[in-house]
Image (cartoon, coloured by chain):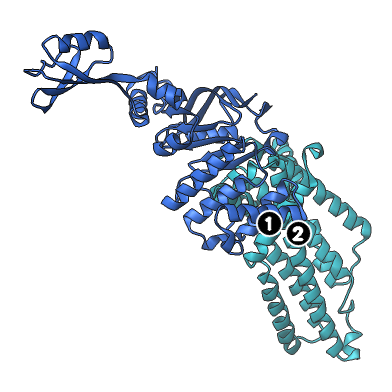
Chain colours: A blue, B cyan
Amino acid sequence: MAAIETTGLAKDYRVGFWRPRPYRALHGLTLTVESGEVFGFLGPNGAGKTTTLKLLMQLIYPTAGTASILGRPLGDLEMKRRIGYLPENPYFYDYLTAEELLGYFAGLFGYKGADRKVRVDRLLDEVGLGAERRMQLRKFSKGMVQRVGLAQALINDPEVIFLDEPMSGLDPLGRKDVRGLILRLRDQGRTVFFSSHILSDAETLCSRIAIVAKGNLMASGTLSDLVTAQRNGWDIVIDGLAQAPAAGGALRKVTSLAPGRFVIDAQPTADPLDLVRALTAGGGRLVSINPVHDTLEDLFVRQVDQAAGTDRFGGAEPMGKSA
Amino acid sequence: MSAMVSVPTVARIAANVFKESVRDKVLYSIVLFAVIVIAASLLLGQLTAGQEVKIIKDLGLAAISLFGHFIAIFIGIGLVSKEVERRSIYALLAKPMSRAELVLGKYCGLVSTLTVNVVVMTAALVVVLAIYGATVEPQIRNTWEAPAVDPALATAAFLTLVELSVVTAIAICFSTFTSPVLAAAFTVGLVIAGQFSADLKNFEHIVDNHAATWLLNALYYVLPNLAPFDVKAQVVHAQPVTPTYVLLTTGYGALYVSALLALATLFFSRRDFK
């Protein structure tokens, strides 16, 4: 069973004071996240990541489309017992201590007495706040609040955890801790859906990713599928050539490495065998030939650029102006 | 609605609101109240002859009501809007609870705070009156219409609490769909109008226009009628406040609160938290 499913999920906001116009923040998002996956929901600021998470948490209501979590409709209380959520830049009641806040949230799940205390203590230790458990949250740094946020998202041992920018506000050590935590959750078979614009986190953690830009789903799949599928050239090293091959046609760029030795950047559409045959015909010797693949960053930038430059992806435009 | 509402969840939210009031030093108002009542009784003891107890009762009950209104309005409007503005509502609504439970929990939490406030302030007033009564000579005491420590004080305090419950519901209802400033303005306006809404009924005798009469009648039924909750004058002057009156007035308050909370839940349940 899919852990999360969305079908044609869309959200319009009304913008403008005197004459409010609809602004489409999310365009018909259709997505499936399987159980046990760490799913990275990537996109630049304003791409629709937080809107999607808020829709899934029913903090806002969709203009169109449907979604389900663990096979149940959004807002279902039984489903809510089985999920956890860390909002972006979370804020919690600053008059409470970390211990009291987690105790309060644990109580909302029906945990009582010793069970509640054990749960709270364990989680505070796990996020590195064991020593600060009796400190009021108003004295916490941003990173400490983020850690409390992570702890409250896990208070009910959720099957599906939604994390909106979980690394936000954390120092390098904190980020390492959170990465470790997400990997532990994955090893326990939990589903983690996290939004981020930090690509290295996605590369380290995710089994699958989706890229959104301007409210549109631009790509989704496993990292290896998405990145490998996007071959963008051939990298050929030839030795023993009397003179450099002329750039042009299939050869995008020729660079001299040493006398007689050249590295050639060839078009991805070119046949590699034909290229090697042509380059070695004049007495050259093939040293290596490798396909050049995109990095996640290349893929991300290209998808975001495509969303920005194409009329059909009119997320930033008021409705009616886009095609 | 009852099928959707979990009492333990509402109770936990209410307990958290109460804790917030305590931590934010709302209950310090009790100390201020005690100081005002004690200072007033000492001062009035020097200035007035024979009327001191009436004045202390009147002043004390008025102060209970005034402090209560400040708390009900200015904390009431912030209960929901502060959650939304500070975004603490995001993590909260992801927990297994409905928006109706959140509204009810917030309401019950503030009413609990108000109850503690009213009970402790009334107790403080009774203590001051008891001490004052014990220090006065018997011949002066015999001229009083009612004893210093009069059980009717509890009736007046109780009806004040019911009134404050209605005011809290008004504040929460407005805060579910408008900004805190507007919610405060609307609530204060409605509370003031509520003190005089009974007069709207009398307009049909002086206004000739049928449409205006109809409109004023409609307003009379829609606006809260808060005047019946104020029995200070009766209590101070030892006029009876019958149990039937208390029961009917409380029933009216409960109905009005139910309607307002249902409306608040309706508004809040449809709201997007952007």
- Quadrant assignment, res A286: top left
Q: Where residue B230 sits in the image (x, y, percent)? A: 79, 61
Q: Residues within 10 Å of mark 1 (few under 14, many from 20)?
A: many
Q: Is residue B97 left or right of residue A257?
A: right
Tell me which amino acid carries mark 1: Val
Mark sitting on residue B30: none
**Considering only order in the chain, which callout, 1 or 2, is on the residue closer to the N terminus?**
1
Q: Chain of mark 1?
A: B
User: As rendered, which of A197 and B153 lies closer to the eye?
Assistant: A197
Q: Where residue A24 sits in the image (x, y, percent)? A: 47, 27
Q: Chain of mark 2?
A: B
Tell me, yes or no, if residue B223 can be seen here.
no
Q: Quadrant of the N terminus of chain B?
A: top right
Q: Where residue A34 sits in the image (x, y, percent)? A: 59, 26
Tell me, yes or no, if residue A193 can be seen here.
yes
Contact flag, marks 2 and 1 (Cβ < 8 Å) = yes
Q: Is residue B235 left or right of residue B108?
A: right
Q: Nearer the viewer, mark 2 or mark 1?
A: 1
Q: Is residue B196 left or right of residue A297?
A: right
Q: Which residue is pictured at 65% across the width and 47% down the height?
A: A155
Q: Residues within 10 Å of mark 2 (few under 14, many from 20)?
A: some
- Residue that numbered label 1 is attached to: B17
Tell me which amino acid carries mark 2: Ser
- Residue that numbered label 2 is attached to: B112
Q: Which residue is pictured at 51% across the width and 40% down the height?
A: A164
Residue furthest to the left in view is A242
Q: Which residue is pictured at 76% across the width and 57% down the height?
A: B163
User: As rendered, which of B154 and B189 lies closer to the eye?
Assistant: B154
Q: Is residue B240 above or below residue A247?
A: below
User: As rendered, which of A242 and B45 lies closer to the eye?
Assistant: A242
Q: Is residue A118 above or below residue A232?
A: below
